[in-house]
Structures are given as structure tokens and as C-alpha cells.
Amino acid sequence: MTGESPILAVSDLVAGYDPGVAIVKGATLRVAEREIVVVLGPNGAGKSTLIKAIAGLVPISSGEVRLDGQEITRLAAHLMVRHGLAFVPQTENVFALMSIEDNLQLAGAILAPRLKAERIEATYALFPDLARQRRLAAGRLSGGQRQMLAVARALMVSPRLLMLDEPSAGLSPKLVEIVFAKLADIRRSGVTIVLVEQNARAALAIADRAYVLAEGRNAHEGKAAELWGDPAVAQLYLGGIRAAPQGGRP
Amino acid sequence: MISSLNLQLLDLQFLADGILAGAMIGLGAIGVTLTYAILRFSNFAHGEFVSFGAYATLLGSSLLGAIAGGFTEPIGPFSFGWGVVLAGLVGMLLTGGLALALDLVLFRHLRHKAGSITVVIASFGASMALRSAIEFIFTSRPAYFSRELQIAMPLGLGVKITPDQLLLIVIAALLVTLMHLLLTRTRIGRSMRAVSENPALARVVGVDVASIVRVTWITGAALACAAGIMVGILVQIRPHMGFDLLLPFFAAAILGGIGSVPGALIGGLVVGIAEASAVQTIGAEWRGAIAFLILIAVLLVRPTGIFGKPA
């Protein structure tokens, strides 16, 4: 990262679901505008808790989160989108019982009616698959389409920062490729992206930089390409994680 | 003997009675189904919202009547005056306020700390406390909005209906339609469905869950009040009126599918008509058992209800 002021600055964050039981035990992130930053780490490293704490979904006991210089530590989760931070959870990230259209309408509820209508049309232009089945309940979409809807939903509010928790989870390698290519497109449109991933190979392929978390703390950080080449890191945190084939793979 | 049996079979009065009772059950069941869908617990105090609403309206209309006698003058062919209408609107707000107050002092704390069974038991306690308080203040003697007698109009096929009954069916249909439109067409409705399906995701997309919870309490309680006023107009006002409806409410809500407003109404109609036909065919003493039987049958055959979505 260069000297410019970061869009996301997380400092010494300590967070956990139960008071006194920290899962994230002092994590620090610096993300510059238009960067793609991936947070890696073994299972139970606190990656998911970290991203949820930033999004306001997990209580923060100490540390600080700043979005574009403005402090958003402990801001209520529902206010995050108004500050330009959109989050895509790992599972159940669309309203399965609601139609695609209603999912987008809901996401655009904080916008003025005309702007909302424009954004919905823009979203359909960007994701033609969704446009063809507006009235379909989101729960009937395939895994890949559902992930696309979740991302489209998050983009409705034109966030400055898009955070995703394991966007590759449960997807076939082919779909992972498509979703990650979409993320690269989204970054080109000016959105900064932070993602948590188990699938280090796919994530590092599109990321600029990466943080490796272990036991709730920063263990390593560096440029994506360098990190992938670092044998110690690969051995400790990246290798083996996805070595065993997952369900849904050919 | 045979001819009287035929007459019995052709007597469709039970349908009119059943639809009427069903509309009131449906209005109450909407509150039950919304509370369950959004707050995730069975609110046993919902029946007391019905009674509270009826008594609040009674008190208000009596006050209005004392201020100006014109308020008690029956409107057109109906048995009640503008006092009941105005007091009813205020009563709906007050019942909403009661629900909010109950949530503030009781349910909200338990929701975050305890399991849903604890909240259900707490609502049972609230139900008893409210019922006793109402009985203490108003005594258990039945009360009436009006002493006017209504003449039933023949509708054909042996069915008779009073102007009050006709009006209340129309109002119930209107309220249910409004609720349905609110849930399906508006931002608040979409937010309510979102919170019902996935509260955490709802927060992520920008829904203020606390305000949706408040809206749920207010609408559910206001509809309960409307049901209470209807029972008061058609039957009588008693401290136990709401509690006696609780089982039919739950039967209707579960039959219709938890979270479904049209389902609650249809469930209410089925329960109401089944009850009325039981009164006619088996005997009035079996009326209360019908809701229970329907509840058991639905839970055995289709636990998600008519409009329920499989989990």
C-alpha cells in the first residue's frame, strides 16, 4: 500500500460474540481505494468474525474501524450501507422467499425512488441472468446465480467498499472463476473490495494484497503474488486448506 | 322427520355465521402470525389485546357519549354510533401502545437473553395479568356498545344477516386487503418479510430491525383491537373474550401458514365455518373443540399450513 489515506482502516480490533471471549484478538487492516484485499487464514482464525465485526454484526470490545477517515466502530449494522459499506455474508445472503425484484427493491430502500428504479435497471443490465427472472423467488436460483444476486444486491447502494465473506463457498471451480471475474470488473468500476477466503488460489489471483490471520491476529501480510510464492506462508496457511476436493466439484 | 332433516341440510345460515366468526378470528390471527414470523414466539397475550381494545373502545365511546349525546345515536341501520367508530380508532392506537409497552418492559429483555420458550411463558403471564386487571377494573359482567336491536335481513336460501354483520364483514375484508398490500407492495412490508426470513441479513441490507419490530407490534395489536370491537358489537364485551379466541387464532395462523396474512384470514374462515357447522350439526358444546381438532389435524398432515413455505 502506498502513502495515501486508506479507505478502510482497522486498528487492533478485538471482537467476539460473547463478551470476554475474543475471537478476533487484535487485527489490523489498511485498504486503499480501488484495491482488492483478501484476508486468508486457516479455519477458526477469526477471518469471518473480523469481517462481520467491521460490518457491525459482531460486538467489538476494543480497537477502531474507520471508513474513509470516519469512525464507524460499533455503528449499528443497518446504518453501514448509508456510510457506503456493503457486505455480502457467506451463507443465506439473499432473501430466498422473496423475488429477485423484491431483493433488489429492499436493498434500494434507502435510495430516492427514481434513483432506486435506475439502479435496479442498471443491475439487470449488469446481470442479465437476473433480469430474465425478476419474479422468481431467490431461493430457486442456482448457487452461482444466488451469489450474483447477493453481489448485485450489495452494489445497489453504490458502496465505496464491498466486503464479501467467502464468495467461493459451495461453488464449482467454474463458477468461482465467473464470480471472481465479476469482482475484478466491479473493482474496475471504482469499488474497493475486501474479501475473506478459504480458496486462496482463486482469491490471490485477483487480489492486490493479502493479510493472513492466525488465531485472531495478523500473521503475515504482503502483495498477493509474493504471498502466494512464500513457501512458509503457503505451507502454514494456504496449502492444504482446499487440497481436499469439496462437494460439487467434478 | 325427513323433511326437517332436509331443511337442516339446506340451512346455510351456518355459513354466514361461520364467515363472520372467521373474519374476526382471521383479524386476530394476523397479529399472531406476524408476531411469530418476526419476533419468533407465540404471543399468548394476543387475546388480551382483543379484550383491551374492546374495553378501551367501550370506555372511549362512553366518554364521548357523556360529552355529547349525539355520539351514541346509531348510524343509519347500524346498532352503534360515531362514538364507537372514533373511540375504536383511538382504541387501535392505544392497543398498539399497550403492545409496545409490553415489549419494552417484558419481551424485549427476554428476547435477547432467554430462549423462545421463556418468552412464550412470559406472554402467558402477561396474558393472565392483563386479563385479571381488565376483570378487576371492568368486572366480569358482560358489557355492550349499544342496546339497539338489529333486525336480520333475509339474503335468500334461508340465510339472514344483520346490517352490523354485513358492515363488519366488509371492514374485515378491507383491513385484511390493506395488510396484504402493506406487506407485499411497500417498503415497510418488504422489510417485515425480510426480518421474518433472516434478521441478520435484513440488518446488512439496511433494515432497522428495531423499528420493524415496533411496526409489527402496532399493526398486530391494532387488528386485534378491531377484532375485539367486532366481537363487542356482535356478541358482547367480557374480560375473557380475547382469551377464548386465542386457540382459534393459533389454529387459523398455523392452518394458513405462519407469516402469511392471506393464510391467516383463510385459516380464520375455515375455523369459523367449521365451528359454526359443528354448532349446527353436532351441538354447541363442541364448538370449542373444533379449533383444537383443526390445529392437531394441520400439524399432523401439513405442519407448514396452506400457504406456509417448507423450512
Image (cartoon, coloured by chain):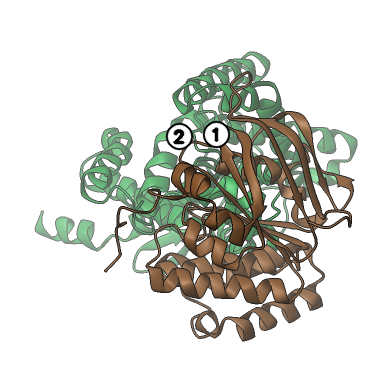
Chain colours: A brown, B green
Residue linked to disc 2: B246
Q: Position of residue B225 (x, y in %)?
A: 63, 41
Q: Position of residue A54 (x, y in %)?
A: 70, 43
| Residue at image point 69% right, 47% down | B80
Crowding around mark 2 (Cα neighbors within 10 Å: few <14, some 14 to 19, many 20+) is: many
- Residue B149 visible here: no
Q: SS class of the residue under badge 2? A: helix
Q: Position of residue A216 (x, y in %)?
A: 59, 33
| Residue at image point 34% right, 58% down | B306
Nearest to N terminus: mark 2 or mark 1: 1
Residue linked to disc 1: B46
Crowding around mark 1 (Cα neighbors within 10 Å: few <14, some 14 to 19, many 20+) is: many
B209 relative position to A99: left or right? right
Instruction: From this view, report whether residue A190 is shown above or below residue B200.
Output: below
Task: Pick whichever, B268 or B190, lies toward us.
Answer: B190
Instruction: From this view, report whether residue B165 is shown above or below residue B225.
Output: below
C-alpha span from label 2 to label 1 = 7 Å
